[in-house]
Amino acid sequence: MKVAFLVSELNGVGGVASVVKVLAKRFSEDNEILIVGRNNNIPDTDYKFINWNPDGGNVFEKFIKGVNKKTRLLCGERMSKIVEKATFPKRVLRELINIINEEHIDVIIGAAGYYSMMLGAIRSYVKTMTIGWQLNSYDAYFNTAGKYMWHKDRIYSRLVGNLDDYVVLNDYDKKKIKDELNINSTVIANIKTYESNETSDLQSKEFMAAGHLWNGKGFDLLIESFKIFAEKNNEWKLKIFGVGPDKDRLENMIREYRLDDRISLMGNTDSTKREFLKSGCFLMPSRWEGMPMIILESLEMGVPVIAYDITAMEPLVTDGMEGFIVKKFDTNAYAEKMLEIAENDELRHECGRNARIKARQFSKEIISEKWIELMEKHI
């Protein structure tokens, strides 16, 4: 079977690129793999790559998309079709149809919302099985002002509803996408990006956090919590890995709270595994997530997790088992759980053991088998 992934790019370090690469590698054991997208190349593989980058649109198309980001005036049934045509011009759709038909693809998977919609727009013009893949939460997709699928609810429902199947990451999103957009879906969790024979000994008095430094990741909330934590504990420190537009703001907060000697912004790391081995607990203060790959890595490395009660955490961390789930976005309660896990060695190690057990549920064998079952259902 020839399986294609339609994806923006695989050379980045984000969650989409990571999980697509792992799934493609697993599929390649029994199938021919094709990657369609921009600047894509994975060394030491025999995948076929088609470098395809949909153009950003002409002046009119860009204008329509810009207006739609700022107002709901174009969200009605009739006007939304104008936005749809501006988002997916015929010339772009024709290019994709030609690629799919010329390559004789059996199954094509659109990674994330934009490519899921695009496949829905061409479904009636190809014989290929089309699968959309929602790699973030419903709330992030449709409730984040100016980003993702903001003001595209009607278009999304219309196009994604054309697909043969649509994959979401958890039961909450399955229910939400059905209730709000009348889209049926299949729940398949993300696959672990690596497996490790090593685990943290959890002796380090160091918290670890990681992600793009922007509002959605909630590092401002984390610094607030650490300030409260530091009033009762003078030993543990916090390392935050990542880069992004909020760096200056976060640095200012750290200076203002006089925590320069306790909190470090580390920039990017070339090995999260190495950093997990040096950590006593992983902190996830995100306001929303799809299914954070970094949490799967933390579980695999036997490192407890503290996170807010966002829907993405439901299949990953059970409160009191692999760590703690805190009422969103209660910085005082978060600080209390940091203190609890920092000052209770037995609890920390128990959570670490539970984390390793939970990680087994997301092995490449288990998750890829669910994908294979989904595809066989439609063949």
Image (cartoon, rainbow, N blue to C red):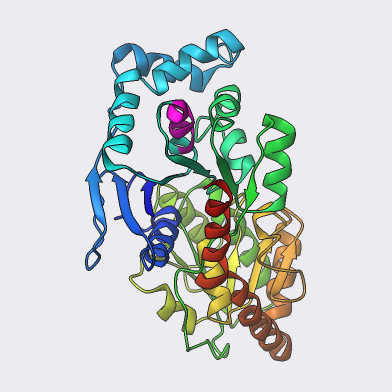
Q: Residue furthest top?
A: 78
117 part of magenta stretch = yes
Residue 374 percent across, percent down from the top left: 57, 53
Question: Vertically, is 105 above or below 22?
Answer: above
Which corner quadrant holds the N terminus? bottom left
Q: Is residue 66 left or right of residue 201?
A: left
Q: Residue at x 23, y 45 (%)?
A: 50
Q: Is residue 363 visible?
A: no
In-image side of 139 versus 219 (left or right)? right
- Where is residue 256 drawn, in percent x and y? 53, 57
**Going 61% across and 53% down the picture, which residue do you hit?**
169
Residue situated furthest front in the rendering: 379
The relative height of residue 113 versus residue 203 in the rendered view (above or below) is above
Q: How many marks?
A: 0
User: Which residue is located at x 60 percent, y 34 percent?
Assistant: 142
Can residue 303 be seen in the rendering of this structure?
yes
Range covered by the magenta-colored residues? 116-124
- Taking 22 as reference, is 56 above or below it? above
Q: Is residue 325 above or below residue 57?
A: below
On the image, the x and y values in percent for residue 357 come to 65, 81
> Residue 46 versus residue 215: which sits nearer the camera?
46
